[in-house]
């Protein structure tokens, strides 16, 4: 059974327990989430001026659009205030800032129709983040910047919560991906040629669940939950913010969603920063999740995380 809890008043610990069992959470906008959206809005408005960011795709060549995104997205990720806003958001959401770690928030775009569906606006086929080296306790936070509709939100596929899917995650190593594929993102305009984990059997998209919340509303789900990008037929480009969190006690204890079909190696855990002071997750914990490639992990430590795609 999957439940969507709306504005649930429960402790972070209980919420995590529910999320690890496949429940979903949606929250009304709060001060911190709205502040994050405001930063995204201002940067997008500036980048696409004089066009409305939601309609700029109708006025620009796809090459120009990609060029703008290639500059806009890192500017959001590295915005000096974004980390503080995540910290404030955790505070508002009842998370223990000393025990909750997060990765930097990303700005995502999903253009209407077939204008741009690769690289920097990749339309995500159904997947679990745990196919991409996310730990079982990873939680995904997703926030729309502008109004969304069923036609430009994201979709959840609940039947696969406890149903394994044959997939190609065995070929995915997070450190190799960082090294070889991320820098290619801006070059992928019409077809994305980068090899990513995907289902190797047909996926039944229905039943599916689409949650529509207000701009600044917050959707939280387990990284193990099968989800996908809805083909955007809304007429407007979707802008959304997302980031991930882990609780260090759950990392240490190996608690999280059931691991039913992930065979990837490497871990994203070294990308996570502590909520109160942005110190990286301890290496002795990250190494427990490395899988089979610790030598690559050491190399990864010296590299700066760039655009994450999942
Ligand atoms: Fe994802």
Image (spheres, helix red, strand yellow):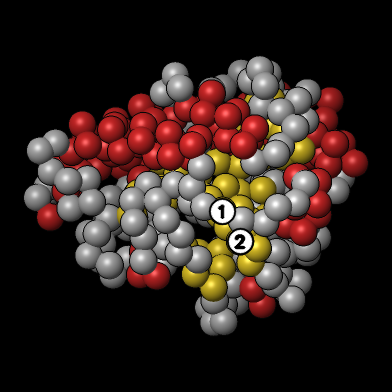
Please tell me which residue is depicted at 44% across the width and 19% down the height of the picture: 80
Residue 26 percent across, percent down from the top left: 58, 57
Would residue 23 be found to the left or right of residue 251 on screen?
left
Q: Are marks 1 and 2 in contact (CB under 8 Å)?
A: yes
Would residue 246 be found to the left or right of residue 114 on screen?
right
Please tell me which residue is depicted at 10% across the width and 38% down the height of the picture: 50
Would residue 307 be found to the left or right of residue 132 on screen?
left
Q: Secondary structure at mark 1?
A: strand
Count the numbered circles shown. 2
Task: Please indicate, yes or no, whether residue 106 appears anywhere in the rendered image.
Answer: no
Q: On residue 6, which mark appears?
A: 2
Task: Please indicate, yes or no, whether residue 17 appears anywhere in the rendered image.
Answer: yes
Is 213 rendered above or below residue 178? Answer: below
Please tell me which residue is depicted at 68% across the width and 70% down the height of the picture: 3
Quadrant of the frame with the N terminus:
bottom right
Q: Earlier in the sequence, mark 1 or mark 2?
A: 2
Q: Secondary structure at mark 2?
A: strand
Real-space CA distance between mark 1 and mark 2, rounded to the nearest whole angstrom: 6 Å
The residue that label 1 is drawn on is 27
Please tell me which residue is depicted at 51% across the width and 42% down the height of the picture: 30
Q: Quadrant of residue 252?
A: top right
Q: On residue 205, which mark appears?
A: none
Residue 31 percent across, percent down from the top left: 49, 37
Question: Which residue occupies the foreground of this view, 231 or 287?
Answer: 231
Residue 291 percent across, percent down from the top left: 78, 42
Question: Which residue occupies the foreground of this view, 18 or 208?
Answer: 18
């Amino acid at each position: 059974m999957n439940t969507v809890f709306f504005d649930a008043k429960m402790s972070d610990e209980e919420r995590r327990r529910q999320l690890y069992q496949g429940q979903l959470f949606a929250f009304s906008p709060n001060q911190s989430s709205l502040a994050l959206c405001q930063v995204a809005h201002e940067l997008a408005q500036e980048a696409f001026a004089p066009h409305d960011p939601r309609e700029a795709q109708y006025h620009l060549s796809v090459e120009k659009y990609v060029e703008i995104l290639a500059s806009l997205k890192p500017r959001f990720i590295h915005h000096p205030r974004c980390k503080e806003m995540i910290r404030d958001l955790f505070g508002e959401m009842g998370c223990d800032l000393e025990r909750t770690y997060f990765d930097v928030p990303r700005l995502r775009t999903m253009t209407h129709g077939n204008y741009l569906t690769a690289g920097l606006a990749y339309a995500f086929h159904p997947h679990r983040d745990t196919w991409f080296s996310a730990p079982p306790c990873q939680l995904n936070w997703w926030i729309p910047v502008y109004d969304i509709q069923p036609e430009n939100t994201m979709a959840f596929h609940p039947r696969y919560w406890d149903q394994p899917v044959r997939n190609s995650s065995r070929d995915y190593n997070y450190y190799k991906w960082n090294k070889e594929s991320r820098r290619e993102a801006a070059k992928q305009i019409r077809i994305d040629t980068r090899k990513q984990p995907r289902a190797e059997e047909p996926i039944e998209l229905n039943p599916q669940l689409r949650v529509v919340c207000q701009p600044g509303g917050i959707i939280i789900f387990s990284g193990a939950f099968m989800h996908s990008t809805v083909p955007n037929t809304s007429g407007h480009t979707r802008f959304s913010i997302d980031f991930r969190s882990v609780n260090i006690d759950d990392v240490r204890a190996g608690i999280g969603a059931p691991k039913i079909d992930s065979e990837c190696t490497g871990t994203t855990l070294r990308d996570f920063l502590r909520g109160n002071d942005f110190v990286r997750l301890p290496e002795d914990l990250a190494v427990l999740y490395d899988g089979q490639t610790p030598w690559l992990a050491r190399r990864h430590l010296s590299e700066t995380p760039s655009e994450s795609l999942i």
